[in-house]
Amino acid sequence: MEELTPALIDRRGTWKVKAGLAEMLKGGVIMDVVTPEQAKIAEDAGAVAVMALERVPADIRREGGVARMSDPGLIAAIIDAVTIPVMAKCRIGHFVEAQILESLGVDYIDESEVLTPADDEHHINKHVFKIPFVCGCRDLGEALRRITEGAAMIRTKGEAGTGNVVEAVRHMRAVTGALRKLHGAGPEEIVMEAKRIGAPADLLEESARLGRLPVVNFAAGGIATPADAALMMQLGCDGIFVGSGIFKAENPAARAKAIVAATTYFDRPEILADASKSLGKAMRGLEIGAIPQEELLAGRGW
Amino acid sequence: MTRPRRVGVLALQGDFREHLAALRACEVEGVPVRLASDLDGVDALILPGGESTTMARLMEPGLKASIQRRSADGMPVMGTCAGMILMARDIKDGRPDQEPLKLMDISVRRNAYGRQIDSFEAEVESQAIGAPGPAVFIRAPQVAERGPDVEELASHGGHAVALKQGNRLALAFHPELTPDRRWHQYFVSLDGESR
């Protein structure tokens, strides 16, 4: 088979194809859904993808206990309900949950801190999978560690299930601020900065050259209003994950549409004002300081 | 008419920045298009990759009508992947409420190759670009039917993956995700025409 040139063979599961799907999601909103009906509402509203889950983060937070991969039957029902890509979450380090999700045909796996970690030292080696992974980060070092392990898409963690955007803003500013500081840095400075933040020097050098992460970077964790989504877009993210913010609100269909519009017209305040009108109550939300330290999700991940 | 001076790229959602970068590499000015008024002053239009349902949802009626009118008046249009779906006359197995722009006499099937695990890279050969070039197929559509005026520019695995009708060009893959700029160069070489 050596004589066959690669030109004659279709190549599946390549880095280009994995990172390429994330490129197609840019400027869009990915919505958490817990039923096929919610998935259809999300698709109708213009979501670019849905995240299939048993419980949204606000409920995971309220109910406590160990949060695991969702029932494959539910994920399969959601896959059947919509034509847009379907994502699903596995626990940090739980590569068997990831294998199961891959066999179900999900389009992207979120190795997520919202679920209870299965490994307190390692994340999954994502290179060995044919389908792509998205992972959370709080800063540039964490983002680049995940990309080294094979993540083809990054999202800032924020603090899921709070309806409070402050942590998402903190993490996005940490990433963009760190990238800005690298502007004009020489190779010897890149090496020492890589050591300091625990990131591979080659990926840090690439990020410095591009002025951004080498993969698509969405915002997540606490986005509850059209203005929140536009804020994150203006801070430089490529798109938005909304977890509890839609289906924990009074009028999910209207709010979903408004957040989709706000993500496209993020720099047009008059369109944002119009989109934000008469949406009913947003999810109630939580003050970060009122959450016990051990219940914060963003600190999970290594 | 000579080659377009300013090319609009539909910038509602998807990989419009990659198309704008490809145009820069071809030394053509690219302009993001989100509203009907953005279409004034562009000589050609690219419909990028992304989610076709999302783009259709976000396209305001005025923009949709303007694109259809300008295309009928001879503006060159190129669609890649989701853009090809938007250009079709109808969508097989699509959502019942998903009304395409009907710029080309083709009928397409969404996600026809399967889910993300079936997405692939390949080489595609076409007289339009010369030697075979890289092509990235991501949850790509297939053309189920095409009218007599639609010319096949390239095929892969027995399916037409690049089609041309007048100065309208539909690609099932993403040339914008590769460093090969020949499909963009080919597109900007198409003349405006009146129909």
Image (cartoon, coloured by chain):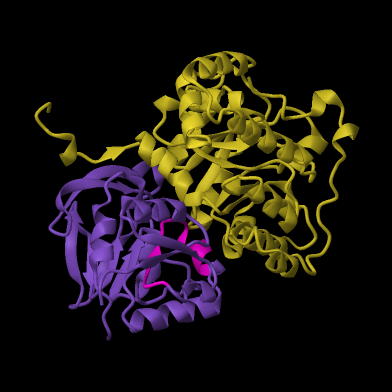
Chain colours: A yellow, B purple
Q: Residue at x 63, y 19 (%)?
A: A302
Q: Which residues are magenta?
A: B42-56
**Residue at image coords 78%, 40%:** A166
Q: Of residues A167 and A18, which is closer to you in this image? A: A167
Q: Is residue B143 visible?
A: no
B124 magenta-colored: no
Q: Is residue B40 left or right of residue A293?
A: left
Q: Residue at x 38, y 66 (%)?
A: B7
Which quadrant, please, contains the N terminus of chain B? Answer: bottom left
Judge left or right: residue A229 versus residue B92.
right
Q: Quick one: which residue is furthest to the bottom in this view?
A: B195
The x, y position of residue A145, in whole percent, is 54, 22
Q: Position of residue B59 (x, y in %)?
A: 53, 71
Q: Quadrant of residue B141?
A: bottom left
Image quarter for residue B72? bottom left
| Front residue of this view, candidates A79 and A215 | A215
